Image (tube, helix red, strand yellow):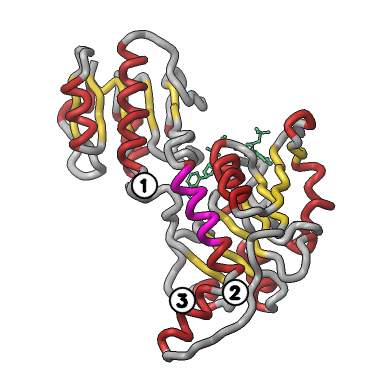
């Protein structure tokens, strides 16, 4: 069985495994000559569309394993008969940490303090705490739960919203989100980009949020209609903290960059030191399962 992985460390893991696996390194650069034989393809992490398009040139392919939790961009390239597995779980801690970091930074006014620091100005003032705020998490999945655990430690009240209501778990369905939005001080997006969620956060959604509320997006940029968000943040009625944007990357002259009340991070939710060790564990386990003809984890298509 031939496996392509994007990191030397993953190749070492394959060599150390008891399975008869032949590994090649493909990190998005030069394409290995073994493309006709690859059966299990670990797509390089956030390395561009050409790494998905390559799937069409792999005649023996059986499994595509992404290292991202989101898979909307690779899905259209996966032929029938090939399983697609995502990296659900790998990024939870890192992304939740960033989401909570963005909430704290925005509510406590870190950007204004950083600007004042540049001028040597002691800008003492009272800011909003996370404690006692109501945070609505839209997308109560793997990442959403990890965000909740951290927010509870900060003494916030969490409202859970998913696609489907689960009253026994205290989870509201998306159809009930309208009135809940009006009570939330912070709305965190942690849901996948699908046909149903593209543009979900439109002018009506934003209008339903309370004055001064914070929108945090650690999901995918296109879930939010940027053209609807811009007037809300430009007017100062809402504030926002965006790890993902539409368009992405955000061009240098985009008005979101310079909007007061907006914090932008360049899609780094999952990209921290916790990524590679967790990604290696997932890939090792998945290759073992595949070689042992056991069920794969995280099969999404
Ligand atoms: N910024 C980053 O670097 C970064 C890192 C990791 C993940 N992400 C993004 O976060 C997303 C979520 O990841 P995950 O691993 O937590 O996924 P997950 O475990 O599959 O959870 C997704 C959650 O979203 C909900 N959902 C799906 N469609 C919905 C809809 N139409 N309306 C409302 N809720 C909906 C699901 O509801 P049900 O429970 O009812 O199905 C589920 O609760 C990923 O798809 C990815 O795009 C971003």
Counting the numbered discs, the total is 3
Alpha-carbon span between mark 3 and mark 2 = 17 Å
Assess whether mark 2 and mark 3 are in contact (beta carbons under 8 angstroms). Answer: no
Q: Is residue 54 left or right of residue 244?
A: left
The residue mark sitting in front, 3 or 2, is 2
Q: Earlier in the sequence, mark 1 or mark 3?
A: 1
Which of the two residues, 163 or 160, is positioned nearer the viewer here? 160
Dot 2 alpha-carbon crowd within 10 angstroms: few under 14, some 14 to 19, many 20 or more: many
Q: Please indicate whether residue 85 sits to the left or right of residue 127 in the image.
A: left
From this view, report whether residue 110 is shown above or below residue 28. Answer: below
Q: Is residue 216 magenta?
A: no
Residue 289, located in which quarter of the rendered image?
top left
Circle 1 packing at 10 Å, graded few (<14), some (14-19), many (20+), is few
Identity of the residue drawn at 80% across and 51% down: 180
Read off the residue under disc 1: 46
Between the C-alphas of marks 1 and 3, the distance is 23 Å
Q: Dot 3 corresponds to which residue?
A: 253
Query: Label for residue 217?
Result: none
User: 137 above or below 290?
Assistant: below
SS category of the residue bearing label 3: loop
Indicate the position of residue 204 as horizontal and vertical percent values.
78, 59
Magenta-highlighted residues: 93-102
Element on which disc 1 rests: loop
- What is the C-alpha distance between the residues marked 2 and 1? 28 Å
| Residue 286 rendering spot, x and y as whole percentages | 36, 22
The location of residue 49, given as percent across then percent down, is 37, 45
Which quadrant would the N terminus be assigned to in this image?
top left
Q: Residue under label 2, please give it.
A: 261
Q: Residue furthest right?
A: 179
Mark 3 or 2, nearer chain start: 3
Q: Residue at x 54, y 72 (%)?
A: 256
Q: Are marks 1 and 3 in contact (CB under 8 Å)?
A: no
């Amino acid at each position: 069985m031939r496996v392509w992985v994007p990191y030397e460390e993953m190749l070492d893991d394959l060599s150390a495994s008891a399975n008869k696996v032949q590994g090649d390194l493909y990190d998005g650069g030069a394409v290995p000559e073994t493309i006709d034989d690859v059966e299990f393809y670990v797509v390089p992490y956030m390395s561009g569309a050409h790494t998905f398009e390559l799937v069409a040139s792999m005649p023996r392919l059986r499994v595509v394993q992404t290292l991202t939790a989101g898979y909307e961009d690779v899905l259209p390239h996966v032929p029938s008969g090939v399983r697609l597995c995502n990296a659900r779980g790998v990024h939870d801690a890192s992304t939740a940490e960033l989401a909570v970091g963005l909430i704290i930074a925005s509510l406590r006014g870190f950007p204004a303090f950083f600007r004042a620091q540049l001028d040597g100005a002691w800008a003492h003032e009272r800011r909003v705490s996370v404690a006692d705020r109501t945070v609505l998490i839209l997308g109560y999945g793997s990442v959403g739960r990890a965000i909740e655990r951290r927010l509870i430690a900060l003494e916030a009240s969490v409202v859970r919203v998913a696609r489907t209501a689960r009253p026994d778990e205290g989870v509201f369905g998306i159809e009930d989100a309208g009135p809940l939005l009006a009570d939330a001080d912070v709305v965190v997006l942690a849901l996948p980009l699908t046909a149903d969620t593209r543009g979900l956060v439109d002018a009506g959604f934003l209008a339903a949020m309370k004055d001064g509320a914070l929108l945090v997006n650690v999901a995918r940029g296109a879930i939010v209609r940027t053209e609807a968000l811009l007037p809300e943040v430009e007017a100062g009625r809402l504030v926002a903290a965006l790890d993902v944007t539409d368009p992405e990357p955000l061009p240098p002259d985009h008005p979101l960059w310079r909007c007061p009340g907006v914090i932008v991070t360049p899609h780094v939710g999952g990209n921290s030191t916790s990524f590679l060790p967790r990604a290696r564990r997932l890939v090792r386990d998945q290759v073992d399962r595949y070689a042992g003809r056991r069920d794969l984890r995280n099969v999404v298509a």
